[in-house]
């Protein structure tokens, strides 16, 4: 696999969409959509544009113009948005116009905007315009834009003309089209970059940057003059208003500088569009769009350096409105039934987090719910390709199930033979045979030649060092925190740190050293060794790290704060100060959970965690993660709101991907040491009896704390932890997991406890089945500096 190929995508385990055409993944028809509206109900109109394949009428000209690289995820973005609008926000299929590839010409997009949105929209109607494709910055001397360069959307037919002009749709034209819509409830979604053609599609790596290479076309200027006449604006007044801000509604974009595609199998999607739509499937209540965009960023940061941006009409207060100006009237969901054939149902699985998608294979069970979230039956997943599934009704009346019915998670399955997929960088091509031989007997580690990978084994090269340093320089020039842009088009570059990928840029690993990269070419912390290290020595050194990464992958497949129905809440505070909350997380679908009540419009506290905090002047990073200095004393609290006892475990994953078990921590205590009784709160440490403290320490970086609560005793977990502690002569205290097999041993026994069933007598005995009514696995993050 070449370096260029690898840097053109991010891979997700399990896939996002099936490798089929849009007609195939849309077998349902309009007549199957269950929706009704009275005549005076405002209409919901959408124009969705996605361009993978740009015009190749003159391939030589395209090549010379750096236009030859085509996209792979933009058309998928349209399908993700379409399913969300129909099934979660109540749009009628007939009110959604879709333009993809050769239909998305400049004139086609403008006609769609004018005919479908502008001519039809009435006051109080809802309008959505989504664009996924290439973006650019083109010379526009009299456009009234900063530095005379206008941001632009690149339509299908925007090949460079002889005079250097291109038929792009500029930000000025988009402003005028927005102004022409006869409703204030307008949302523009842009999954593109304005850093030049071909800046979307790589791992946040901008190649063949054409920004500023072309100029606005004469046709574009003529078209703008027509709209200025229609709106009664002089060009001077138009420029003044454009510089103040957007004329209507809300604009949400995937970030100004880099835009990333994610790979699922061999079908792509835009990272921002995927995370945005998945988040909105899970959204609860009247969450403000400003809060929602911040929360989308937290999920996106794991896979992309994008930081989404929110722009609202100045002084409109639109940041306090719900996304799309619509409060969903249905409960959050992992899936929706799109077609019914007897007892078999076709499913769209757009609400499942991509990190946990591999846990939803054959045998997973989903609950049929009504519009109030009440259970009406069960569906078992029979097959899945990406986000398209087929299931069978196993409880409830199959003839009562209709298209449009929502499904929530009941049981997911985690394979016990899951592997960590390792790619080999071309810099180690000559050592490939030795690497494969060294790893072939290591359980759970798989060498992948092509396809989905989790990490890349590589030497540090001159080009990688230069790229990493340039990226850090750009990051230092950028903002330290995401902003809600209340006016105008933001021009700032955006980069963000990734969870386990952190290191000191003042001391990059030496040239010739061997270590691990993420698929995005981020260094895995503490993975690179000495200069010119022998491959066999490097492999031996890295095996514990690879095992830790595998264990982290396994345990994170159990994360379910959005779908769990076990009523528990956890928070992190300053030691002895329970009112000084640093971070808080809970199971949002439990009606008595306080966090679930914080979704109202205008409330300052976001519904999503782990960002919730109550300490005055607490610093947070651009993803709203609390920043805590080294040497801070902290404390964890887990409250059981169930009517039954629960059993808890706390695991910390530091920036070096090392796991430490914080609780349990008494290795000679009784079997029920992990028990938390009804309506009681577990405190770690318990200041009245524990003789230890939790103090943040090096290494600096992002730390993730996993809070696990189960209705079933954690007997197997406790047993293996005691064995490890005994081998070290430890009677109590935290247990740092550092031996080769310890991380996977602990996690596999934990999953065995969480399963709680008799796997040997099940047909799918190689699957850990986790029941959302019996289990909550939550995460709180903090950055240690």
Image (cartoon, rainbow, N blue to C red):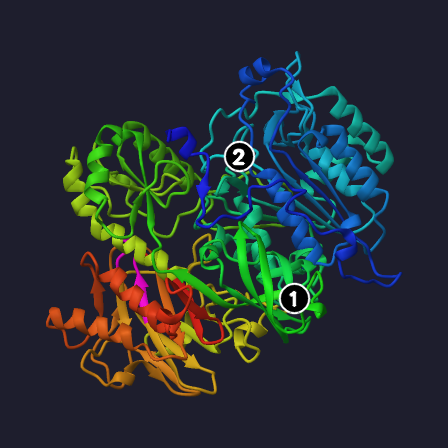
Residue at coordinates 26% horizontally, 84% vertically from top-left?
Answer: 671
What is the x, y in percent for residue 275? 54, 51
Q: Label 2 neighbourhood size at 10 Å, few (<14), some (14-19), many (20+)?
A: many
Q: Is residue 530 left or right of residue 354?
A: left
What is the x, y in percent for residue 722? 19, 74
Q: Nearer the viewer, residue 449 or 67?
A: 449
Residue at coordinates 74% horizontally, 45% vertically from top-left?
Answer: 247
Q: Label 1 neighbourhood size at 10 Å, few (<14), some (14-19), many (20+)?
A: many
The answer to whether any part of residue 573 appears in the image is no
The residue pinned by badge 2 equals: 200
Residue at coordinates 75% horizontally, 57% vertically from top-left?
Answer: 33
The answer to whether any part of residue 373 appears in the image is yes
**Which mark is first along the chain, 2 or 1?**
2
Where does the magenta region start and end? Answer: 650-658
The kind of secondary structure element at disc 2 is: loop
Q: Quadrant of residue 681?
A: bottom left
**In this view, 58 is above or below 138:** above
The residue pinned by badge 1 equals: 286
């Amino acid at each position: 696999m070449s370096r260029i190929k690898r840097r053109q995508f991010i891979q997700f385990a399990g896939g996002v969409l099936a490798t089929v055409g849009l007609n195939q993944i849309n077998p349902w028809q309009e007549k199957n959509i269950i929706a009704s509206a009275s005549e005076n109900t405002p209409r919901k109109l959408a124009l969705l544009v996605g361009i993978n394949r740009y015009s190749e009428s003159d391939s030589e000209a395209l090549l010379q113009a750096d236009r030859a690289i085509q996209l792979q995820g933009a058309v998928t973005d349209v399908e993700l948005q379409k399913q969300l609008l129909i099934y979660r926000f109540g749009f009628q299929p007939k009110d959604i116009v879709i333009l993809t590839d050769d239909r998305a010409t400049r004139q086609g997009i403008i006609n769609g905007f004018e005919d479908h949105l502008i001519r039809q929209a009435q006051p109080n109607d809802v309008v959505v315009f989504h664009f996924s494709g290439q973006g650019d910055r083109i010379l526009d001397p009299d456009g009234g834009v900063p530095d005379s360069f206008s941001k632009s959307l690149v339509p299908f037919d925007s090949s460079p003309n002889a005079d250097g002009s291109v038929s792009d749709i500029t930000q000025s034209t988009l402003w005028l089209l927005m102004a022409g819509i006869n409703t204030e409830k307008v949302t523009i979604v842009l999954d593109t970059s304005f850093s030049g053609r071909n800046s979307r599609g790589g791992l946040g790596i901008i190649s063949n940057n054409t920004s500023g290479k072309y100029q606005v076309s004469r046709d574009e200027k003529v078209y703008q003059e027509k709209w200025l006449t229609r709106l009664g604006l002089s060009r001077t007044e138009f420029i003044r208003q454009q510089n103040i801000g957007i004329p209507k509604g809300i604009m949400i974009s995937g970030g100004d500088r880099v835009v990333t595609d994610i790979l699922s199998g061999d079908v792509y999607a835009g990272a921002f569009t995927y995370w945005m739509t998945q988040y909105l499937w899970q959204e609860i209540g009247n969450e403000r769009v400003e809060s929602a965009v911040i929360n989308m960023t937290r999920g996106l940061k794991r896979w992309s350096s994008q930081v989404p941006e929110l722009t609202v009409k100045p002084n409109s207060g639109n940041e306090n409105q719900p996304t799309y100006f619509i409060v969903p009237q249905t409960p959050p969901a992992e899936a929706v039934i799109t077609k019914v054939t007897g007892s078999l149902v076709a499913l769209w699985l757009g609400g499942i987090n991509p990190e946990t998608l591999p846990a939803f294979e054959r045998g997973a069970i989903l609950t049929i719910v009504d519009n109030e979230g009440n259970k009406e039956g069960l569906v078992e997943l029979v097959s899945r390709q990406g986000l398209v599934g087929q299931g069978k009704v196993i409880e409830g009346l199959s003839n009562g199930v209709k298209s449009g019915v929502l499904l929530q998670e009941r049981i997911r399955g985690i394979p016990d033979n899951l592997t960590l997929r390792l790619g080999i960088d071309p810099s180690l091509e000559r050592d490939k045979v030795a690497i494969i031989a060294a790893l072939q007997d290591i359980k759970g580690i798989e060498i992948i030649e092509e396809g989905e990978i989790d990490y890349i084994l590589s030497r540090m090269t001159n080009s990688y060092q230069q790229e990493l340093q340039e990226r850090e320089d750009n990051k230092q020039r950028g903002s330290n925190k995401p902003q809600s842009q209340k006016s105008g088009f933001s021009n700032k570059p955006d980069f963000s740190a990734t969870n386990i990928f952190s290191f000191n840029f003042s001391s990059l690993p030496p040239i010739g050293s061997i270590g691990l990269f993420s698929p995005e070419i981020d260094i895995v912390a503490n993975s690179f060794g000495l200069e010119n290290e022998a491959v066999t020595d490097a492999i031996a050194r890295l095996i514990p790290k690879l095992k830790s990464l595998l264990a982290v992958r396994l345990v994170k497949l159990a994360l379910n704060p959005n779908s769990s129905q076990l009523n528990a809440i956890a928070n992190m505070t300053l030691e002895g100060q329970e009112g000084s909350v640093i971070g808080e997380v809970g199971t949002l679908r439990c009606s008595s959970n306080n966090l679930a009540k914080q979704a109202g419009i205008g409330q300052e506290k976001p519904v999503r965690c782990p960002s919730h905090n109550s300490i005055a002047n607490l610093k947070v990073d651009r993803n709203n993660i609390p920043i805590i200095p080294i040497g801070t004393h902290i404390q964890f609290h887990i409250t059981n709101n169930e009517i039954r006892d629960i059993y808890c475990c706390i695991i910390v994953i530091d920036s070096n991907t090392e796991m430490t078990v914080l609780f349990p921590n008494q290795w000679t205590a009784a079997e029920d040491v992990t028990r938390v009784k009804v309506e009681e709160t577990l405190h770690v440490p318990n200041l009245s009896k524990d003789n230890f403290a939790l103090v943040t320490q090096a290494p600096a970086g992002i730390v993730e704390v996993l809070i696990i609560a189960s209705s079933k005793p954690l007997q197997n977990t406790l047993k293996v932890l005691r064995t490890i502690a005994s081998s070290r002569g430890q009677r109590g205290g935290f247990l740092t997991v550092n031996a080769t097999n310890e991380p996977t041993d602990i996690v596999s026994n934990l999953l065995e406890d969480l399963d709680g069933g008799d796997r040997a007598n099940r047909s799918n005995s190689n699957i850990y089945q986790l029941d959302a009514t019996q289990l909550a696995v939550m995460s709180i993050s903090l950055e240690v500096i």
